[in-house]
Amino acid sequence: MGAMESTATVLVADDDRAIRESLERALQLEGYTVRTAADGVQALASVHADPVDLLVLDVMMPGVDGLGVARVLRAEGDRTPVLMLTARVETPDRVAGLDAGADDYLAKPFELDELLARLRALLRRAAPVTGDAGEGPLRVGELLLDTRARRVWRGEREIELSKTEFDLLELLMRNAGIVLDHATIYDRIWGYDFGPESKNLAVYISYLRRKLEDGGPPLIQTVRGVGYTLRPQG
């Protein structure tokens, strides 16, 4: 993983110069190549001129904000992983970021270790899948998940998922009927346990439910105080 990280190029777009410069220094020390932008227009121009491996976008920027940058890139078919930085912790703000095509989000203020863990997880997910060529799709009830093509269907309906949502659903499907605790899910999906106060997982679960269930019977069950499980519909 070290070699992959050391060659990865990250674009940091934030209108706060202090944050931009401190992130640039910290990421360079970790071996990343870093480019910066002060707003969304600069960020888009930079990515269009020369693609990057990861984007760290502040939600609130003048002109084109982080959500706007993510929407434009996704509309162009650009699947570069996006980590959204948000100063607001309300769930709707996070959901808007995920709707725009962000793969993960982090509320300010954040610990540098947490940011680095998120970036490593996004890079790992973006890496091409090798090996398990013989592995077939996963099926749980009406759900069908193609691990190679990273596509998901419920019955006849294909469901668009971000990288994080896909990995979370794959983990739940591989362990269908088994209750996975919060720490296990955090470790498997992010490689980092954000602690009992973190709402990160709950937001992704609610988002996944919204996309999967669409008025149908619930698939993902909450086991209060423990974690989550995917129960096949009998």
Image: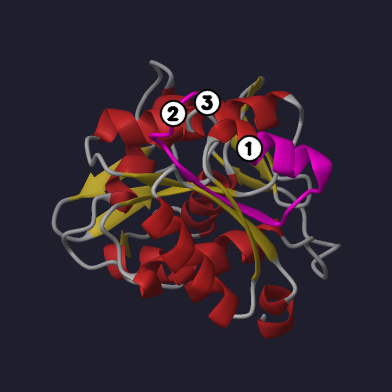
User: What secondary structure is found at the residue carrying circle 1?
Assistant: helix
Q: Position of residue 202 (x, y in %)?
A: 28, 46
Look at 82% across and 67% down and name the residue there. 130
Look at 31% across and 51% down and name the residue there. 200
Q: Position of residue 183 (x, y in %)?
A: 30, 70
- Circle 3 crowding by C-alpha within 10 Å: few under 14, some 14–19, many from 20: some
| Residue 142 located left or right of residue 182 | right
Q: Earlier in the sequence, mark 1 or mark 2?
A: 1
Residue 44 colored magenta? yes
- Circle 1 crowding by C-alpha within 10 Å: few under 14, some 14–19, many from 20: some
Quadrant holding the N terminus: bottom right
| Marks 1 and 2, how far apart at CA | 11 Å
| Marks 3 and 2, how far apart at CA | 6 Å
Quadrant holding the C terminus: top left
Residue 132 colored magenta? no
Question: Do residues under tags 3 and 2 come within 8 Å of each other at their CB atoms?
Answer: no
Look at 41% across and 71% down and name the residue there. 187
User: What secondary structure is found at the residue carrying circle 2?
Assistant: loop
| Segment colored magenta | 43-64
Kind of residue indicated by mark 2 = Pro
The label shown at residue 228 is none
| Residue 207 located left or right of residue 30 | left
The label shown at residue 64 is 3
| Marks 3 and 1, how far apart at CA | 9 Å
Q: Position of residue 53 (x, y in %)?
A: 71, 57
Mark 2 — residue?
Answer: 62
In the image, is residue 188 above or below residue 210? below
- Would residue 18 be seen by someone viewing this image from the given angle? yes
Mark 1 — residue?
Answer: 42
- Would residue 152 be seen by someone viewing this image from the given angle? no
